Amino acid sequence: MSLKLNTNEFEVPIINKYPTLNLAFIVLLFLIILIFVNSKLAEDIEKNRQIYEHKNLKQALEIDLAPDGIFVNSINLSREMTEQLGYDEEENIVSVYSDAKLISLIIPSKTKRAYNGKIELRVYVSPAGEVMKVLVDEHNETIGIVDEIIKKDSSWTSKFKGIMITKTNDESWEDYFSKQNFDVVTGASITSRSIQEGVYKALLFYKENKQRILSTKNES
Amino acid sequence: MKAEPSIRTSHNEPIFDHKAMIGLIGLSPIIIMATSFVSSIITLLSLMFVLILTKAFYSFKDFLFEKRFKFLYMILLVSFFSTLVDLFIQTKLYDFHQKSNLFILIIAAHSLLFVSVLNAAPKIGVQNTLSNIKIIRSFSLLLIAQGLIRELFAYGTIFRDFDIIFGTFTSSWTIQVINENMIVPIFQTPVGAIFIYAFLITGVNYPVIKNRKKNINKP
């Protein structure tokens, strides 16, 4: 007669018998740790975010902003208004104040199809309606070919600085820029023209809605 | 009957010896993130933090769970440590965090891949913990080399991005080595990263394989 030893009860540690409970406990523990760490770091992260935004604004507007005097607000645009800027969804215009004085409005603009799709821009406009800066936010164009246009310190987009729409609304963007002798980047003419269209769209939008935008109470 | 000599007998550098491992690491999204020496160092440190702690805690898996929960446990560990790293990066290196939008996802995806590679190592010929350390060491060197080469060819500079760590006063440390007109913009893209990875692997493997072939052909 052979003696059989049941070893199963020795192979499985007791703690392993409740794997679901173990998993739930670990999830809970990790959550508590993350909430605790997040609550400790949230203030620093928010401070960093403000410094970062301030730095970006300073670079974009190329003016010296007092760190404490700067104030940023966003104005929600209705669906009909954003459609004029090429968007299908709601968007915001950001207004920048320095020492309680409005110094710039950041208008988003989505161009019509460029070479590989639509391009999203941020057009910095002065309260008078002059372009202060144009930045390319998102695009699908071929890197390398459009570098001169999309980079932050692009000499081509800096040519937009100072332009504004003063005359008629009937003028097309093509006519407007050809009158201004505004050249396109060789090898990236479709992208260049698309950005011209986007900038014109933003300027026209501001011209048409200036009073409404400036009188709108800040949302946040 | 004499056995046919194999060129994969020595295991000096495991990462360069195993096609499966080269392929797996080549698929890793983290290679895309190393666009400069500084970014590769930050990425590497973050990755090591997630990887070492995940590996350490994952060793309790047999004690805590049955087989079906083990992968879930690994995902949980990777997510937890990646989130911790992300919070830390947001606190200390916010500019870097903003420049690399998908940082947390990439670190998590890579850690999952790397832990899987290390777990699968014995099955594809890499034998022990020492080999795992060699894989990590070789990968670290590859990532740093990749950052340096990409920075040089894609932007024509060295010591770029130091301001991310040390502040804006170090922006002047960047040295333009190659004229801006001569840079190759494709190296800024993910495709360029994979090219450099392939060149590096080829460059490292070529003399090793050549030596082995020589030794095999010796009477």
Image (cartoon, rainbow, N blue to C red):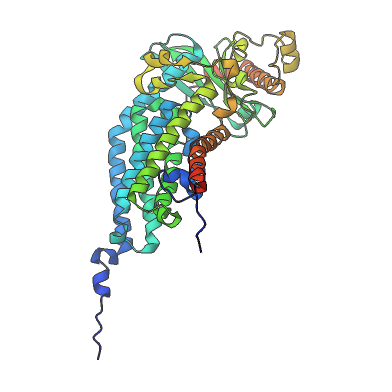
Q: Which residue is nearer to you in this view: A114 or A108? A: A114
Q: Residue furthest front?
A: B219
Q: Which residue is nearer to you in this view: B87 or A5? A: A5
Residue B10: x percent and y percent? 43, 48
Give the image quarter of residue B125.
bottom left
Residue B28 is at least partly visible in this image: no
Residue at position x 28%, y 46% from top?
A32
For residue A85, side relative to residue B204 (left or right): right
Rendered-image quadrant of the C terminus of chain A: top left
Q: Is residue B126 above or below residue B147?
A: below
Q: Residue furthest bottom?
A: A1
Residue at position x 45%, y 55% from top?
B124
For residue B215, side relative to residue B58 (left or right): right
Give the image quarter of residue A53.
top left
For residue B183, side relative to residue A182 (left or right): left
Give the image quarter of residue A37.
top left
For residue A211, side relative to residue A176 (left or right): left
Q: Which residue is nearer to you in this view: A2 or A90? A: A2
Q: Is residue A12 above or below residue A211?
A: below
Q: Which residue is nearer to you in this view: B219 or A147? A: B219
Residue A82 is at least partly visible in this image: yes
Residue at position x 61%, y 18% from top?
A148
Residue B58: x percent and y percent? 32, 52
